[in-house]
Amino acid sequence: MEEDDFISKTQRKRLMSELQDVGAALVELSREQLMRLDLPERLREAVLECQGITKHEARRRQVQYIGRIMRDLDAAPILQQLTSLQAPTRKDTALFHLAEKWRDEMVADPRAVERFAQEFPAADAHRLLALVEAARAERAARRTPKNFRILFHAVNTIVQDQARSK
């Protein structure tokens, strides 16, 4: 073994821990997500088996086994697929920003609720108006923005639902 190939025990342990973390992340995926990934059959079977294990210690050992399998593989492509699967898409981000924009407009302009209800027929204008008034009162009293967040979640749900139904 050459001196350049030397890996300390600490570095090896860190690498093994990172591979186990990737394996644990694979175990948390749904079966459909897992099937979309390009994984070696041996690894896929180990992950699916781990998903069926409920006992803590048995599950921990299976995750260690998954890490052991991954030592023999190039984990970079798997990690890249996993990261892209977990990252929000551009569409998700755009819808999130659209919901933020609508929320801010509603708080600034009372007529924005009517425009929103016209663009999003599933919206309950009366509920949104109540949330907008509560958010304004909250802001005027300089309280924690609880209703402001509730308004955002309501708007975001409506925007996301309409996007899914198209």
Image (cartoon, helix red, strand yellow):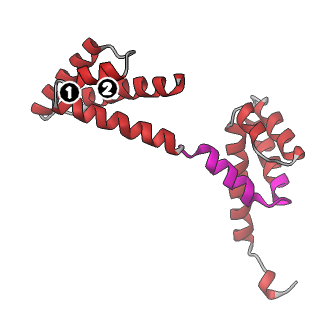
Q: Residue under circle 1?
A: 135
Amino acid at circle 1: Ala
Give the residue at x 76% y 44%. Answer: 63
Nearest to N terminus: mark 2 or mark 1: 1
Q: Is residue 82 magenta?
A: yes
Q: Quadrant of residue 103?
A: top left
Q: In this orientation, does residue 141 appear?
A: no
Where's residue 49, x and y in %? 83, 34
Query: Could you give the CA–CA distance between mark 2 and mark 1, rounded to whole angstroms?
Result: 9 Å
Give the residue at x 83% y 59%. Answer: 73
Q: Nearer the viewer, residue 104 or 6?
A: 104
Q: How many marks?
A: 2
Give the residue at x 74% y 53%. Answer: 78
Dot label at residue 64: none
Dot label at residue 150: 2
Amino acid at circle 2: Ile
Q: Quadrant of residue 120?
A: top left
**Which element type, helix, strand or loop, lies under badge 1?**
helix
Q: Are marks 2 and 1 in contact (CB under 8 Å)?
A: yes
Q: Is residue 66 magenta?
A: no
**Which element type, helix, strand or loop, lies under badge 2?**
helix
Residue range in magenta is 68-88
Q: Main secondary structure of the magenta part?
A: helix
